[in-house]
Amino acid sequence: MNISVVIPLYNEEESLPELFDWIKRVMDEHKFTYEVIFVNDGSTDGSWQVIEKLAAQHPEVHGVKFRRNHGKSPALYHGFLRSEGDVVITMDADLQDSPDEIPELYRMITEDGYDLVSGYKQKRYDPLSKTLPTKLFNATARKVSGIKNLHDFNCGLKAYRKEVVKNIEVYGEMHRYIPYLAKNAGFSKIGEKVVQHQARKYGKTKFGLNRFVNGYLDLLSLWFLSSFGKQPMHVFGCIGSLMFTIGFFAAAFVGGHKLWSMATGRNYILVTNSPYFYIALTMMLLGTMLFLAGFLGEMINRNSSERNTYQVEKEI
Ligand code: UDP
Ligand code: MG
């Protein structure tokens, strides 16, 4: 099969028939063999009935239904699990992404050899309250992930080589950083294509402004996991030892200075009256705690079932 289209959706009943007709038109025109996997993320409207109806009429349509709303990432995860096409395309269900982009995305993966191609909504039809923070968000994501050529990490329209979706695990709200997940899994040829974007036709957006707060925290976790996740001791142990050593010598100096002053008969102050003593003490305490955090991290890693899940690409 050429293409699997994965569509996560939450309360998008009005858009679905129109979206499927459009996809079908494009696929038939280019003679692609394909499947469309609708993942119903606990919709409370009639979305599932619409999917059932579509599936009854078209053998290309598959549906997955969650009992309740879990979020876009789990929906994508289940879509990826079930996709069988050589190229997997994800798109939003709200008709903001255009199926007309599919042939070119497919070509970029199969002929230009990209692992992942992300859409780039250069001209957006969203309110300013969303486009402005998005710019900032993408600049941060570029910096942290080191994927310098992407302008739109969170674009719903993306194309993947099959191996990519089978080797990454989208969870929580990590759908915003799939290119980063792919890069961490060793897929380095990541590209971008400018895509058409439209204003939402039916329904309303499912993400509020807290997407930026959560997105930022998720980025921090990902950055940390990918840089030190497998060896927490390397970062915590290093900073911790350094702080402890500085604190220790500073405390020794404060104490030594007092003893020396006493021995030579000069004026001296109590150790506890010196601010430096407290600074030194705090550094020793924090140093110990950081060191312990690193040590605990290592112990947790040792027990983790994923401590040796590095993916093998080929064997002969
Ligand atoms: N979506 C989902 N589960 C959720 C929230 C959203 O499957 O909990 C789907 C939604 O139906 C749409 C896509 O994710 O197909 C993108 O959502 P939306 O259009 O609301 O996001 P925006 O375009 O505002 O970024
Ligand atoms: Mg949308």
Image (spheres, rainbow, N blue to C red):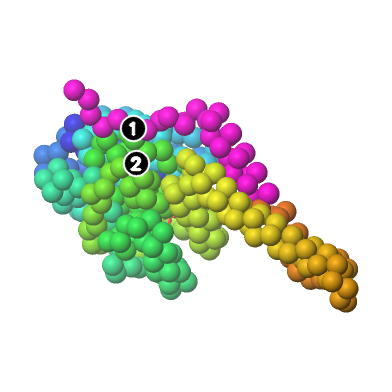
Measured from the top left, where is residue 226 in percent x and y?
43, 47
Residue visible at 43% across and 69% down?
A: 136
Which amino acid type is shown beneath numbered disc 1? Gln
User: In this orientation, which residue lies closer to the viewer: 299 or 258?
Assistant: 258
Residue 78 to residue 95: above or below: above
- Magenta region includes residue 292: yes
Residue at the far front in the pictured view: 264
Q: Is residue 120 visible?
A: no
User: In this orientation, which residue lies closer to the viewer: 10 or 133?
Assistant: 133
Measured from the top left, where is residue 31 in percent x and y?
11, 39
Residue 3 to residue 198: above or below: above
Tell me the CA gap for discs 2 and 1. 8 Å
Q: Number of labelled discs?
A: 2
Determine which residue is flagged by label 1. Answer: 311
Per the rendered image, the range of residues in magenta is 288-316
Which mark is drawn over residue 185? Answer: 2
Mark 1 vs ligand 1: CB below 8 Å: no
Which amino acid type is shown beneath numbered disc 2? Ala
- Residue 115 quadrant: top left
> Would residue 246 appear left or right of 182 to someone viewing this image?
right
Tag 2 and tag 1, C-beta contact below 8 Å: yes
Q: Secondary structure at mark 2?
A: loop
Q: Dividing the image into 4 quarters, which one contains the C terminus? A: top left
Q: Secondary structure at mark 1?
A: loop
Residue at the far top in the pictured view: 316
